[in-house]
Amino acid sequence: EGAWDFYWADVWWMKEIFDRAYLEDQMRINHFRNHYELTRKNLMVKNLKRLRRQLERDCGKAEAQKCDFFPSTFELPSEYHIFVDEFRKSPGSIWIMKPIAKSQGKGIFLFKRLKDITDWKRGVEYQPQLLSPDGTSQAIETYVVQRYIENPYLIGGRKFDIRVYVLVTSYNPLKVWLYRSGFARFANFRYSLATIDDNYIHLTNVAIQKTAPDYDPEKGCKWSIQQLRKYLTGKHGQQKINCLFQQMTNIFVLSLQSCQRVIINDKHCFELYGYDILIDSDLRPWLIEINASPSLTASNKEDYDLKFGLLNDVLNVLDLENRLTGREKRIGLFDLMWDDGPVYSEEGGIEDVISSYTSAANSNLGLEIYQNAESLKKATSANV
Ligand code: ADP
């Protein structure tokens, strides 16, 4: 209602109101109409599998293998039989079951034996009509079942995953900005495969970890990406870690390309994605999930500064006041990474070109950031 230029809509609004809304030229909204194509766990995988098939057809097996950055995944119940075939091929492996429409680790569990999901299949998650004796049947909840990454990279014996922010301002042509900052979220307890039903060990969501018995909100369970990159570089050397971060850039670009033709482009829409990446002990990054509404709640002062700066920079990139030339490659901590093709960094190129099809794009993820809000503001206005 009323006049507005910028609307931070929830996904409900996109579904119920967007199609009926009259949007003036300057109005901007934080989702694309069918954002879920990338942010629903099952649809993300469907789009990635399609891209992999297409790359194999058009460019061959080697190119298609660049899409092998997501663990083997099946939708349940529809792909149950294919999953069982795959499961039997790798006896003893661990799998993770996730409801597609939930977040913050809700409803997730790990299992090793088919019998464990036979029990689950009899339960109310799979057959919610068991809940309604009055005969009103609800739809069966869709899950994805995914190969569990059993060898995560550990720091201090603990598992972590990385949250990276990626801003898409257009799908056609594809225009993508990568935020230099982000964080690693650590589990509170030491990693072990001896107990696969302990969520404090295996799920790194802050929503889960902050309920751990000795969680300290001041200490939190996060490192900045800068801290992480420094640590990893110190341990493994620049070349390996540059390669790791370059592979992450490939994940961002390929996943967005996988749904480029599916997403309904609209000049009023943009999307700030929260990517969750897990690194394994071979320094290989895996895409775990992409969030359409990454949490902007701050868990402490440092987190507040990160998220405040992030939103400030999103608004600067969107440029509602028309102050930019449109040729900027860097705005605040956002680097233009893809603009209908890779965007090369002005600050010294990237050595490890993974693929001409995708990357060599700007990737300063985890590199230099400004020390305080004042210098951040100065840098932003200098760019403007
Ligand atoms: P949610 O939307 O509920 O956060 P995610 O898919 O992000 O669901 O999974 C929650 C957490 O579980 C992740 O942050 C990660 O720590 C862990 N996890 C999820 N999938 C895997 C996997 N395939 N291998 C290892 N850990 C995983």
Image: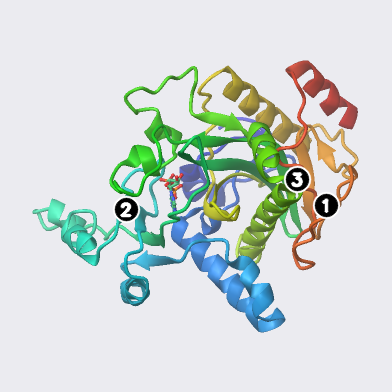
Mark 2 secondary-structure assignment:
strand
Relative image position of residue 33 (x, y in whole percent) = 57, 53
Looking at the image, tell me whether mark 2 or mark 1 is earlier in sequence order. Answer: 2
The alpha-carbon separation of the residues under discs 3 and 2 comes to 35 Å
Q: In front: 331, or 112?
A: 112
Label 2 amino acid? Leu
Q: Position of residue 269 (x, y in %)?
A: 66, 47
Residue at 67% of width from left, 76% of height from top?
62
Write down the residue under mark 1: 350
Determine the image quadrant of residue 335.
top right
Place residue 224 in its image quadrant.
top right
- For mark 2, what is the residue? 110
The answer to which of 339 and 169 lies nearer the viewer is 339
Residue holding disc 3? 238
Q: Foreground residue, 6 or 229?
A: 229
| Scheme of image coloration | rainbow
Residue 27 is labelled as none
Q: Is mark 1 within 8 Å of ligand 1?
A: no
